[in-house]
Amino acid sequence: MPYIKIRGVDHYYEWVKKPSGSLVKPVMVFMHGWAGSARYWQNTANALSEQFDCLLYDLRGFGRSRGKPTIAQASEAVAESESSQEESEAIRELTYELEEYADDLAALLDGLHLQRVYINAHSMGASIATLFFNRYPQRVERGILTCSGIFEYDEKSFSAFHKFGGYVVKFRPKWLSKIPFVDRMFMARFLYSSIPHSERQAFLQDFLEADYDAALGTIFTSVSKAQSEVMPLEFAKLTVPTLLVAGEYDKIIPAEMGRKAAALNDKVKFVMIPNTAHFPMLEDAPTYMQVVQEFLQINIPQPQAK
């Protein structure tokens, strides 16, 4: 499997491409959400690979990418390799702030010698992408934010969410995936329309294998008072043409949150896909691809409805 060291940490990435002769195609980068991986973008990337070279990668601490090593691990790595003390210190200073993940993406593009790209990001990944659009606008042609938005801070509900989230992250026995139908129960809150068993199982596996510190850290940084204050400002100052896609019955990031975010900036086009929830690209792939096609103004072969 291909890995690239980004800011001292090994990141998994893969290309989804189709032969194009001498034609140089633009690159579209896909970013996943909390406790997920690039795996769930495979079908979308395949559908877009006639027009784009699609780059999928796992965020730091999720999927097949490493989490930030502990101080002891970082020190041991320096002792056993040619890594510099400066690199070790840089790794230790990494945090789970979403801005850090935006900088991870910039370093990934640098490492792969990519200058200007399209980006399609989902959920927490979409928040990271929004920050990236404003920090590195010269590197983005167009952006697609799938299931994103702005929310208002409520101390009581946020505290309860963090407490519950911490419990969920702490107690993730690996044998959970062996229980019949547990994948269906696990995904029930995220879906309105059904997706195949194999996809539900992959989501559960990604959740169980996510790095503890990354999973817990990003719960506190992505759903926080600071983010409730920052994200409206970030949406308001976007200069990158952006499509924001929402699922009609999304309980994680309700469509109204996306509608409010899009209303802050005429660069953002809002589209809600009926009869879907937090994964519209999987729940209704044909409609999702049609929306993307219209935004990108390209012709994409339509996937067959399930």
Image (cartoon, grey):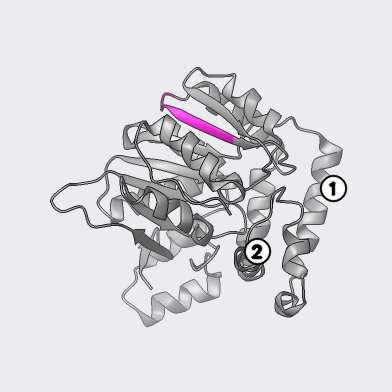
Q: Can residue 265 be seen in this view?
A: yes
Expressed as whole percent of the image width and height from the top left, the position of residue 241 reads: 42, 27
Expressed as whole percent of the image width and height from the top left, the position of residue 173 reads: 74, 76
| Sequence-first tag of 2 and 1 | 1
Expressed as whole percent of the image width and height from the top left, the position of residue 249 reads: 73, 39
Between the residue at mark 2 and the residue at mark 1, the CA separation in whole angstroms equals 26 Å
Q: In the rendered image of this protein, does residue 39 appear above or below residue 174?
A: above
Q: In the rendered image of this protein, does residue 123 appear above or below residue 84?
A: above
* Residue under numbered circle 1: 160
**156 on left or right of 26:** right
Q: Label 2: state its secondary structure.
A: helix
- Asked if residue 225 lies in the magenta stretch, the reply is no
Q: Nearer the viewer, residue 216 or 59?
A: 59
Q: Nearer the viewer, residue 59 or 287?
A: 287
Write down the region rendered in magenta. Answer: 239-245
Which mark lies nearer to you, 2 or 1? Answer: 2
For the residue carrying disc 1, how many other residues have a C-alpha within 10 Å: few (<14), some (14-19), or many (20+)? few
Q: In the rendered image of this protein, does residue 15 appear above or below residue 24?
A: below
Q: Within the image, what quadrant is residue 223 found in?
A: top right
Identify which amino acid the numbered label 1 is placed on.
Answer: Ala
* Residue under numbered circle 2: 200
Q: Residue at x 47, y 74 (%)?
A: 75
**Image quadrant in which the N terminus is located:** bottom left
Q: Residue at x 35, y 79 (%)?
A: 81
Q: Label 1: state its secondary structure.
A: helix
- Asked if residue 244 lies in the magenta stretch, the reply is yes
Q: Which residue is drawn at 23% across and 57% down?
A: 19
Q: Which residue is drawn at 40% across and 58% down?
A: 7
